[in-house]
Image (tube, rainbow, N blue to C red):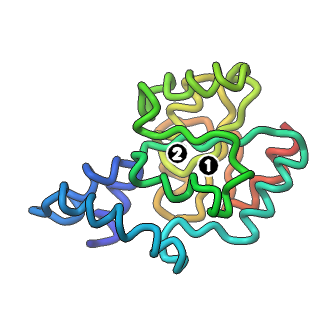
Amino acid sequence: MSREIHKSTWGQHLQEAITERIPGIDTIEFMKRFETLVPQAIKEERFDHVSKENLDVLDEIKKDGKKIAIITSRSLIEVKTIMEESHPLSGRIDKFYHRDNLEHMKPDPRVFNKALYEFDIMPIECVYVGDTLKDGFAAKNAGMDFVAVLESGLVPKYAFKNANIVVDFFANKFTDILPYILQN
């Protein structure tokens, strides 16, 4: 798969993206194999690896008394391993929201409704950290601050500007979010 195809399908549900990434693939068979291979890939830090530095950032945010949720377009099959108690995110993430427990998907700003209700907070009290244009559209249209993390290199800074997304803070890497998050 080319880097361009990877970039153009970033943020899509994997089962949809894989048809563009690998034309002609049997998506049902792929998802079956994906589900069985992901736990080992995570253990080997080839997939969904969270660095110690990034975990430290989450710890600092939690220490400051803030709540952390993950809101992703990925399905339960794609995220269930990172939700397990054995994963380093356990205890750091208060709630996981994914394709299978949400009514709406980004860029629809209603994707946040369930989390806002369950955390009993208003959008103005939230900062959404993301790395896609869909993340930015959803957060800003929901009335939230938006931090764009550029670390993956998949969406450059100018793309957010060209899409007229008002980014409250650009972070070159995830660890750069900490001062912004702690002051808000």
Contact, CB < 8 Å: mark 1 with mark 2? yes
Q: Position of residue 147 (x, y in %)?
A: 66, 45
Amino acid at dot 1: Ala
State the residue at coordinates (61%, 35%): 166
Q: Which sits in the foreground, 133 or 72?
A: 72
Using a 10 Å C-alpha cutoff, classify the residue at mark 1 as few (fewer than 14 neighbours), some (14 to 19) or many (20 or more).
Answer: many
Badge 1 element:
strand
**Relative to 183, is 160 on the left or the right?**
left
- Quadrant assignment, res 129: top right
State the residue at coordinates (46%, 74%): 41
Q: Which residue is mark 2?
A: 160
Decide: is 135 above or below 159. above
State the residue at coordinates (50%, 28%): 111
Badge 2 element:
helix
> Mark 1 or mark 2, which has the lower sequence index?
1
Amino acid at dot 2: Phe
Q: Could you say which disc has been placed on residue 148 in the image?
A: 1
Quadrant location of the N terminus in the rendered image? bottom left
Question: Nearer the observer, disc 1 or disc 2?
Answer: 1
How far apart marks 1 and 2 lie (CA) works out to 8 Å
Quadrant location of the C terminus in the rendered image? top right
Numbered label tally: 2
Q: Which sits in the foreground, 126 or 36?
A: 36
